[in-house]
Image (tube, rainbow, N blue to C red):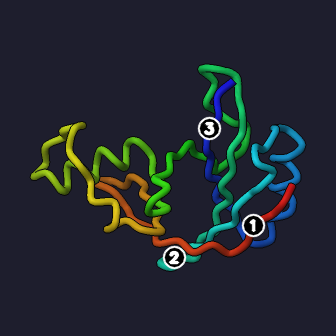
Amino acid sequence: MNNKLYCTFIEEEEIDVVIDEIVGEYEVLFNKIFILSSIDEDKLMLTYNIDIPSGNYNLHLPNTILVHRKKQTNTLYTINALNEVIKYLNNGILDTSYQVDWSNFRNSLLLTRPGGFKKLRTRLKDIREV
């Protein structure tokens, strides 16, 4: 089993239904689901850790992506977005040894977009005990 962090994009009215679906299908580690809102856009996200069989990273939930977290700055990111950030900061060169200054991405979710990356500043809205 592998501990993976997922992010599901939802509408406000879907919060309880989607949380019930997650809890009904998967074992949520630490019994917590975090509800985040975007400061920049009208978006809500659920983040949660689950154990899944090795090699199987796909959940059967719509609008869900695998993310990683930099704890020190509470930054969530996809690997593809991190690669785009590195290219942006490093004159277009992808160098996986490049040291990102994570303080520039504090309390954010980094996503890919055509031609680069998108930074969504986030705020903790609620923590649901499940």
Tell me: 61 left or right of 94: right
Q: In the picture shown, does residue 38 fall above or below 116?
A: below
Q: How many marks?
A: 3
Amino acid type, callout 1: Ile
* Residue appearing at x 39%, y 52% in the figure: 112
Which numbered circle lies on residue 127? Answer: 1
> Who comes first in sequence, dot 2 or dot 1?
2
Q: From the top left corner, tell me how far across and down residue 79 is, in percent.
A: 40, 42
* Residue appearing at x 48%, y 68% in the figure: 107
> Who comes first in sequence, dot 1 or dot 3?
3
Check disc 2 and report its element: helix, strand or loop: loop
- Residue occupied by mark 3: 4
User: Toward which corner of the image does residue 25 lie, by quadrant?
Assistant: top right
Kindly indicate whether the residue at mark 3 contacts the one at mark 1 (C-beta within 8 angstroms): no
- Residue occupied by mark 2: 41
Q: From the top left corner, tell me how far across and down residue 12 is, in percent.
A: 75, 72
Amino acid type, callout 3: Lys
Kindly indicate whether the residue at mark 1 contacts the one at mark 2 (C-beta within 8 angstroms): no
Seen as rendered, the residue at the extreme front is 72
Q: CA distance from mark 2 to mark 3?
A: 26 Å
Q: In the picture shown, does residue 31 fall above or below 10?
A: above
Q: From the top left corner, tell me how far across and down residue 54 is, in percent.
A: 64, 20
* Neighbourhood count class around disc 2 (C-alpha, 10 Å): few under 14, some 14–19, many 20 upward: few
